[in-house]
Amino acid sequence: MSASVATIHREVLPTLPELPRENEGHLSRTDRDHLGERLRAMYAQLRKEPLSPRLQDLVYRLAQTSPE
């Protein structure tokens, strides 16, 4: 892959705002929706990246093995 997750995070996604301490462990519906949008954008960008030759070879070899 030519871009790392950290690079994509900085380029595509702005930083998340700090949550109040009383909401620790709980996100509002709006925050969950916003986070979901950001994650979908990040994964969409990662899916566009080509696989490295080493990973392509591994996927090919796994596909060639028959289930036992």
Image (tube, rainbow, N blue to C red):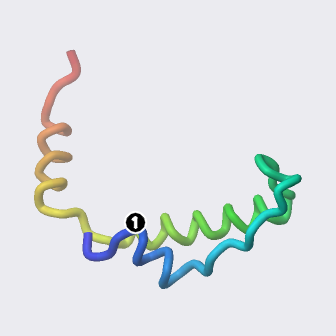
Q: Position of residue 9 (x, y in %)?
A: 49, 74
Furthest-bottom residue in view? 11
Furthest-top residue in view? 68
Above/below status of 62 relative to 57: above
- Which quarter of the figure has residue 65? top left
Left or right: residue 18 compared with residue 68? right
Q: Position of residue 11 (x, y in %)?
A: 48, 84
Of residues 13 and 44, the one drawn nearer to the viewer in this rendering: 13
Q: Residue at x 66, y 68 (%)?
A: 37
The residue that disc 1 covers is 47
Q: Position of residue 8 (x, y in %)?
A: 44, 76
Q: Residue at x 82, y 56 (%)?
A: 21
Of residues 33 and 10, the one drawn nearer to the viewer in this rendering: 10
Above/below status of 41 relative to 25: below
Residue type at numbered disc 1: Arg
Q: Residue at x 17, y 25 (%)?
A: 66
Q: Where the C terminus falls, by quadrant? A: top left
Above/below status of 15 relative to 25: below
Left or right: residue 15 compared with residue 46? right
Q: Where the N terminus falls, by quadrant? A: bottom left
Left or right: residue 30 compared with residue 38? right
Q: Position of residue 32 (x, y in %)?
A: 76, 59
